[in-house]
Amino acid sequence: FEILSPGNNNTEMDKKKLFYLKHGVEEYYVYDPDKISLEVSIRENNSFKEIENFTTWTSPRLKIRFDM
């Protein structure tokens, strides 16, 4: 889970995402408290696939439900 702050930039977030992918992370979440948005990506082969346009998401790994 990542929570964006004003100091985060796209380059930094891209590096973090690649780091997590390299180390076997199955699900990657980025919450933006300013936009009240949640980006959800799941591992698919050797990359992350972003889940788009959801109002409810249940993590396959954690079994936690997110309602947006």
Image (tube, rainbow, N blue to C red):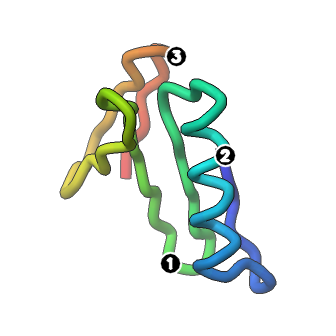
Tell me how far mark 1 sits from mark 2, CA to CA. 25 Å
Which corner quadrant holds the N terminus? Answer: top right
What distance separates the C-alpha of mark 3 from that of mark 1?
Answer: 24 Å
Residue that badge 3 annotates: 62
> In this rendering, is residue 11 above or below 19?
below
Mark 2 nearby-residue class (10 Å; few <14, some 14–19, many ≥20): few
Task: Please give the name of the residue rendered at 67% of the width and 46% of the height, measured from the top-left corner.
Answer: 19
The one of 42 and 47 positioned closer to us in this rendering: 47
Q: CA distance from mark 3 to mark 2?
A: 20 Å
Q: What residue lies at 65% left-to-right and 29% top-to-bottom? A: 23
The answer to which of marks 3 and 1 sits earlier in the sequence is: 1
Where in the figure is residue 7, as x and y percent of width and height?
80, 83
Label 1 neighbour load within 10 Å: few <14, some 14-19, many 20+: few
| Left or right for 3, reference 53 | right
The structure residue drawn at horizontal position 28% and vertical position 40%, both measured from the top left corner, is 56
Asked if residue 31 lies left or right of residue 58, the reply is: right
Report helix, strand or loop for mark 2: helix
Q: Earlier in the sequence, mark 1 or mark 2?
A: 2
* The one of 41 and 6 positioned closer to us in this rendering: 41
Where, by quadrant of the figure, is residue 46 drawn? top left
In the image: residue 41, left or right of residue 24: left
Indicate the position of residue 48 as horizontal and vertical percent values.
Answer: 38, 43
**Label 3, residues with CA under 10 Å away: few <14, some 14-19, many ≥20:** few
| Residue 31 x %, y % | 57, 59
Residue where numbered disc 1 is placed: 35
Q: Which residue is mark 2?
A: 19
The quadrant in which residue 47 appears is top left
